[in-house]
Amino acid sequence: MPKSDKKKEAPMPMTGAGLIRFFEDETHGIKIKPTYVVVGSVIVMITVIMAHVLTGL
C-alpha cells in the first residue's frame, strides 16, 4: 500500500459487545445546535419563574 493511501485512512475504534458506531447511520429530521436547545430551555425556565412570581403562587 503506498504511503499516501495510509494517510487517507484513519484507524477505526474497536467496537465491542455488538455495539455499532453512532456515526455510521445518517438520521433524517430536524438538526438543532445544542446551543439553541440550552437557550430555549433557559427561556422556558425564566418564563415559568416569572409566571409564578407575577401570579403570586
Image (cartoon, helix red, strand yellow):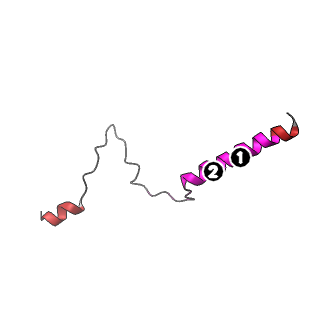
Between 1 and 38, which is closer to the camera in this rendering? 38
Kindly identify the residue that appears in the image at 49 percent across and 57 percent down: 27
Query: Residue beneath label 1, please?
Result: 44
Image-based side of 2 in relation to 50, left or right? left
Indicate the position of residue 22 as horizontal and vertical percent values. Answer: 41, 49
> Which of the 4 image quarters holds residue 18?
top left
Residue type highlighted by circle 2 = Val
Instruction: Please tell me whether residue 38 belongs to the stretch shown in magenta.
Output: yes
Residue drawn at point x = 72 percent, y = 44 percent:
46
Over which residues does the magenta segment extend? 26-51
Closer to the camera, 5 or 34? 34
Number of other residues with Cα within 10 Å of mark 2, as a class: few under 14, some 14 to 19, many 20 or more = few
Q: Is residue 24 magenta?
A: no
- From the top left corner, tell me how far across and down residue 38 is, in percent: 60, 48
- Distance in Å between CA atoms under marks 1 and 2: 9 Å
Query: In the figure, residue 2 lies in which quadrant?
Result: bottom left
Give the residue type that dot 1 points to: Val
Q: Quadrant of residue 30?
A: bottom right
Expressed as whole percent of the image width and height from the top left, the position of residue 40 reads 65, 51
From the image, which quarter does the C terminus lie in? top right
Which residue position holds label 2?
39
